[in-house]
Amino acid sequence: MAISDVKEYTHLTEEEVEQIGRELDAIRTEIEESRGAKDAAYINRLIKVQRGLAAAGRVTLLASSATGKAKKPAWVAGAALLGVAKILENMEIGHNVMHGQWDWMNDPEIHSSNWEWDTAQPAEQWKHSHNYIHHQFTNVLGYDNDIGYGILRMAREQKWHPVYIGQPIYNALLASLFQWGVALHDLDLERIRKGQKDPKEMKRQLRQIARKGRNQILKDYVVYPALSGKGWKWTLTANMTANLMRNLWAYVIIFCGHFPDGAMHFTEEEIEDETRSEWYLRQILGAANFEGGPLLHIMSGNLGFQIEHHLFPDLPSNRYADIAVRVRALCEKYDIPYTIGPLHRQYGQALRTIIKLSLPNKMTSSDQPEPPTPARDRKRRSDAERPPRRQELGGWMRSAS
Amino acid sequence: MDAERVVIAVADGRVPDVTAARWVTQCALSRICGSCAESLGRPVAFLGTPEEVARNAFHLPPMHVDCADALRRTPDADPTWALVRTAGFEFVRPAREDLDRHPRFEPNSLL
């Protein structure tokens, strides 16, 4: 089991692993007991700001289509406002609300069961592919579809194929069309390729995606441009630009979460016997943070605290900054790697991995840092040696055989 | 409650072990009803024995209120089950020292 590898990697005793778990539990309990009006005010304020930005963007674009002189600056301002609004809605609001971070407020709107976000993927499918598959099987090769989104080779353990030579191009396409890549995420392209996907479930998911995608297209590329009258082209291109902004930003932030050097991949066949402490450890070792000011963290949905997000995905995101100080101290105390760096460096490393792994392993070297203590044989296996993919991947339990 | 034996039928008539750790975890994280496998609503319902209610720690996955109510009326249901409504819950994985080695749910905003 890979979690045993983790213990070998960190050279912790069983008691130390459990003690780390207890200390993380204490952090969790403290946040749970202290969350309240201030936190609620934060998310309510943020939603107001986000809606204000979206409205300002729409009004600016409508006005720009009616005026002749300031058309270009108004177009730039409108597109930028809309882009920022979409980023905030997807990253700090939608993603975190759907994790249930704000369910405790009992707000009829700000609740994981009700939120439908401004992107092509249906919320229901996101909650399966992200909340369950990605957060439960974090960085487990063959299980976690976030490792390369089914089209990129992101770990040396993944078998190389000539098709990966085009990886830098696929990566550029994925970044530009990210919302559509995410929309198809829960379909599990690999299982479809292998003929393992239940056709009934696939049809159900495709219908759902088509409905949501159609509504997104109608909103951004038909209704709002139509409302702009003669200036419809300006509104349409501004909406396209705002979506592109959001796509690129979300892609960068997500790729910085698990692919910088130091974020580990796991190859375990069964993780259900993992204890809570072992699960915590796997989350710490499989995620990577980036540094920045409060604005950068809000714009990235507080995913610059990716380690803390993976430890406590359902605690309010506005608390991650405080939690991070304590988690980092804990990692130092127990000599556990805590991967962090500036955003540009983290993304640079992820991009280098994408480019390097487009080639066979024998032509490139690994960039993974050595463990803090001498590593033993981690018993990593090739694709052929790995167990079959989980039955419930990409589909609900009800569709599994 | 014998957590290993409770089973319920999901929408298509299959009968998964509703307390199986994998299913419970999937329901918790995907925010789906443990009974019908559709997205949860608000409030969320939990069924539990008086002991579970007293500990505020439930083993059956979250459900729609109607699904929980229907489950409570099935012949195999535990007659002591109480239905608890909440807006949110914590999902707690078992720790090594826990006597209770099943994943559990702790409602955090009872209604």
Image (cartoon, coloured by chain):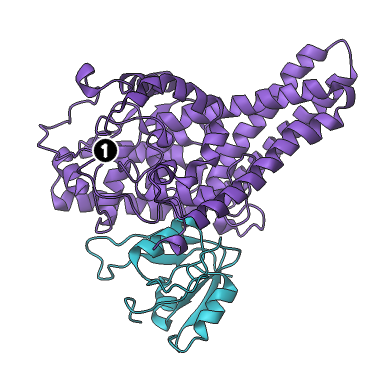
Chain colours: A purple, B cyan
User: How many labels were placed on the picture?
Assistant: 1
Q: Which amino acid lies under the numbered mark 1 shown in the image of this protein?
A: Cys
Percent position of residue A251, x then y = 49, 29
Q: Residue under mark 1: which chain is it in?
A: A
Q: Residue at x 47, y 68 (%)?
A: B34
Percent position of residue A180, x then y = 56, 35
In the drawing, does residue A7 fall left or right of residue B38?
A: left
Q: Which residue matches tag 1?
A: A331
SS label for mark 1: helix
Q: Nearer the viewer, residue A266 or A70?
A: A266
Neighbourhood count class around disc 1 (C-alpha, 10 Å): few under 14, some 14–19, many 20 upward = some
* Quarter residue A331 falls in: top left
Q: Nearer the viewer, residue A182 or A24?
A: A182
Instruction: Decide: is A320 above or below B7.
Output: above
Instruction: Decide: is A192 above or below A200.
Output: above
Percent position of residue A296, x then y = 52, 27
Q: Residue at x 49, y 86 (%)?
A: B74
Q: Residue at x 27, y 54 (%)?
A: A271
In the drawing, does residue A313 fall left or right of residue A80?
A: left
Q: Dividing the image into 4 quarters, which one contains the C terminus of chain A?
A: bottom left
Q: Residue at x 71, y 27 (%)?
A: A239
Instruction: Tell me if I can see residue A102 in this picture.
Output: no
Which residue in the rendered view is the most extreme toward the front? A195
In the drawing, does residue A157 fall left or right of residue B80?
A: left
Q: Nearer the viewer, residue B34 or A88?
A: B34
Percent position of residue B71, x then y = 51, 80
Instruction: Decide: is A383 above or below A99.
Output: above
Instruction: Decide: is B82 above or below A260.
Output: below
Instruction: Tell me if I can see residue A399 in this picture.
Output: yes
* Quarter residue A320 falls in: top left
